[in-house]
Amino acid sequence: SNANLYAVLQGGFPKDRSKVALETPDLEYTWDDIDRATACLANLLTSLDLPAGSRVAVQVEKSPEALLLYLATLRAGLVYLPLNTAYRESEIEYFLGNAEPAVVVCASKNRDWVQRAADRAGCAHVYTLDEDRTGSLLDAAGTLPQTFTTVTRQPDDLAAILYTSGTTGRSKGAMLSHGNLAANARVLHEYWGWREDDVLLHMLPIFHVHGLFVASHGALLAGAKMIWLPKLDADLALHYLPQSTVMMGVPTYYVRLLADSRFDSSVCANMRLFISGSAPLLAETFSDFHKRSGHAILERYGMSETVMLTSNPYSASQGERLAGTVGRALPGVQVRVVDDAGIALAPGEIGNVQVRGPNVFSGYWRMPEKTREEFTEDGWFKTGDVGRWGGESAGRDVPADYLSIVGRSKDLIISGGFNVYPKEIETLIDDMPGVAESAVIGVPHPDFGEAVVAVVVPKDGVSLDAAAMQLELKSRIANFKVPKRVHIIDQLPRNTMGKVQKNVLRETYQAL
Ligand code: ATP
Ligand code: MG
């Protein structure tokens, strides 16, 4: 049998291929359309006669054709390499130089500078693809046969290289195999109860694991329809929610929906599942959303290197969805929390999160050193996240098999020799009246090594008193944890996946 991920996904397509697979505000694509269009594109890629393992790098706006190009790349047995649409010339130059793709597909408006970067990287095939179904890629593929025999791949063959979000440093290319992606897609299919009559409201970008793999694979493997929107737009979301059953978003999507007074439980009448990930969901967002919609958002945890690792329960019989936790290890996925010597920690104790499983990548593209560093000798991947089993979250006791992510090891603050976990202080600050959200960082300090600094965003129309906040914290936590400075600002810097950029904050507020 063929382990090619496309063949696996295709196994889930509905019997009736004339049903709608993808819907946009002005077009519908059936499952037959997907089959035919990916065949044309796969025929084009195959006609280039590329060596095995060749990369197809893609930086285009989200459109149905962008998804088709991903699927066609799988079908042709080549390696898909999506790039964030926000990247500009110098960044694209790094990625193309690092990945040395055989094919680059870009937006026609960027054609000039992408071509320059492609030339320097020795890439001979540059195509354009725009959101309105124009560009040289479709021109070239449109006349080719609409049938294609999906290339046979082994589970370990490379399917995609996903560059990490670059939250903690330079992005690394995570090499994911057909087997990695198929294993995770199958597990999530079961775990989240995907059905053919589901309708997924897909508003995430597709250059990242969340939108490209978790969301798209879920719907494709279920043979379920996707409503395909370029981004979160409150008007469109409110228009399509009543006919949807599943939505996935980063936490800011849920904050945006709550900010719209039209959002209520009647809009969600058909919904069975709201999923959040890519960044921590605030307990307050979880509870506000529950009050307004009647739905408990299911928070899950994963990363480019591993796809999904843990999830809050789907059905009530499996347990409750708990705010501030990311739930249990998914079936087949092993998760452990260890100290710096690699010893497993008891529930309630904070340590390094390490994982193992059929979903875990094989290494970073062209970074053998880094790859060696990030795996233990016995094959566990060091996620770089800090977490704990059980403990307490949002005033509730958490079962010992639920994981909570406390932060990233790179964001851990060591002040006067003591460990400070930013999340602990952020949680206290977030609970203060008038606070919308906060970020706690460490900045260089001559005596303590690092000093704790808080950056706080007030709720709309509230003016906060930094000195009063420090006093309040002093009465509640050890002095070394109390922020030496509290900066009140309008908005935290976030990247496109809604992740707070603590490196930017550290740079901005390094002077005490
Ligand atoms: P880089 O590795 O380049 O610094 P990144 O880690 O942000 O960037 P991604 O692979 O996109 O790149 O993100 C994975 C990270 O996102 C996880 O390691 C974790 O820190 C965070 N994350 C994902 N889901 C959650 C969640 N539910 N709660 C808290 N953090 C999460
Ligand atoms: Mg990372």
Image: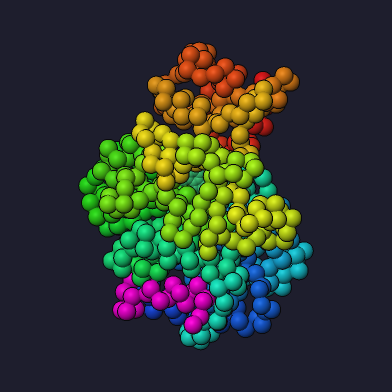
Query: Residue 47 falls in which quadrant of the image?
Result: bottom right
Where is residue 509 drawn, in percent x and y?
64, 27
Where is residue 27 drawn, in percent x and y?
37, 67
- Is residue 404 at least partly visible in the picture? no
> In the image, what residue occupies the spot 34% across and 45% down?
321
428 left or right of 306 in image: left
- Is residue 193 at least partly visible in the picture? yes
From the viewer's side, name the closer residue of 332 and 59: 332
> In the image, what residue occupies the spot 25% across and 43% down?
294
From the viewer's side, name the closer residue of 7 and 256: 7
Q: Does the magenta-highlighted stretch encompass residue 261? A: no
Bounds of the magenta span?
1-26
Where is residue 287 drawn, in percent x and y?
33, 36
Q: Is the magenta stretch mostly helix, strand or loop?
A: loop
Q: In which quarter of the image is the C terminus?
A: top right
From the viewer's side, name the closer residue of 314 and 288: 314
171 left or right of 293 in image: right
